Amino acid sequence: MSTPTIRITGGYPLTGTITASGAKNSVLKLMAAAILAPGSSHISNVPLISDVTLMAEVLEYLGASVVFGEHEVSIDTSGVQRHDAPYELVSRMRASTAVLGPLLGRFGQARVAMPGGCQIGARKIDQHLLGLEALGVEFETEHGYIEGTAAKGLRGATVVLDIPSVGATENLIMAAATARGTTRIENAAREPEIVDLAGFLTTMGAHIAGAGSPIVEIEGTDRLYPVAGHQTIGDRIEAGTYLAAGALLAGPLTVRGVDPAHLEAALRKLEEAGVEVSTGPCEVTVSRQRPLKPLTLQTQPHPGFPTDLQAQFMVLAALGGGSSLIIENLFENRFMTAFELMRMGADIRIEGHNAFVTGVPALSGAPVQAPDLRGGAALVIAGLAADGYTEVSAIEHIQRGYEGLVEKLQAVGAHIEQA
């Protein structure tokens, strides 16, 4: 039985409007946070992607009832009694470690499989554990599992993160929401998804100040309540992927359903590349009248340029005039897409954390394999701009984070199909 692929005939213009789905990197944490409040919480603007389905499996394993509607989910955590997340689930999605903070916050104990590495590098969780230890959790690691216990309950503390880790910041905020006293997180991650999580928890009854800034303070409360309704923010990475495609094919292409403020760094780089960018409430439009210019960019924690858009912008650099430099500061293996782009005729030299990209007049369609989620999306947009026929395999990576990618691109003129 053959595995699904995405087949593309390149060179056709993209014009029209695409609506971004809810943010993958937000909704997974919102679903986990529902554990903190016994009862039924309701989340809307939920993307229909495989990672959401897997997070539902994690919650159901713990004892929750998860019911999906049309881009919405109801999670009843009244029956949650287990406090362990097994390897067979964690190994399929690292974001399932987000249940660590909520389980500790509700039950004072949690047992979660060690996630190990992933295709884009080893995402260590030492910052999670050190921060939670400051809140009174004692950890033991054995047989591939991390077991945490707060025998005397969680207590507020000051936690200074070595790096602004998104996952550590989220787990600490969720655990601290029910801790005794006040928790102060310094060097906190500032991503919009953290602000969304804080809004969800605030609706639950949590007391959180400073989300989206380097210092977050949480005053613990005895009890949290289910959320009757919360709308997930739009997916800035999905939006940025389509905007990169629009820039490649000249547009005009509009992406709706995302706050332009969440994409400031990416939009600046599009303008530097010679792309015309205009914004409105919850939408961005790109178009291009002139050749692409070379780029210099380096990935940084928010509000810097997002690592999740690095591969897509490498495609822009591959077709830009002159020499571009891309510096990947966050993940050691995130240049794997470059080797697939070279199969399509890109001129890229990798030296450690640096990619030196010399623009070529055109890419040539070829069979390529998605190395990871964002790299797979980058290869799709490369195929849209390439001469001839491109077939992208291993598309299960893409399906983890893009709802209806093929259908959305078809609607704006792409010659693309899943087969």
Image (tube, helix red, strand yellow):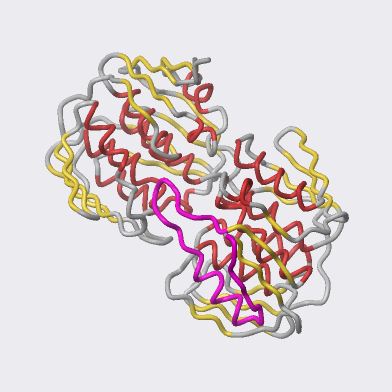
- Residue at (60%, 41%) from the top-left corner? 51
- Residue in the foreground of this view, choosing between 145 and 173: 145
Counting from the top left corner in percent of width and height, residue 191 is at 50, 60
Counting from the top left corner in percent of width and height, residue 12 is at 34, 16
User: Is 122 inside the magenta-drawn segment?
Assistant: yes
Classify 320 as above or below 41: above
Number of numbered discs: 0
- Residue in the foreground of this view, choosing between 68 and 230: 68
Res 331 → quadrant: bottom left
- Residue in the foreground of this view, choosing between 178 and 151: 151
User: Is 295 inside the magenta-drawn segment?
Assistant: no
- Residue in the foreground of this view, choosing between 388 and 146: 146
Classify 13 as above or below 290: above
The region drawn magenta spans 114-143
In the image, is 178 to the left or to the right of 197? right
Counting from the top left corner in percent of width and height, residue 400 is at 54, 38
Q: Residue furthest left?
A: 322
Classify 67 as above or below 387: below
Q: Residue furthest front?
A: 143
In the image, is 301 to the left or to the right of 316? right
In the image, is 246 to the left or to the right of 298? right
- Residue at (42%, 56%) from the top-left corner? 122
Counting from the top left corner in percent of width and height, residue 105 is at 73, 70
Res 275 → quadrant: top left
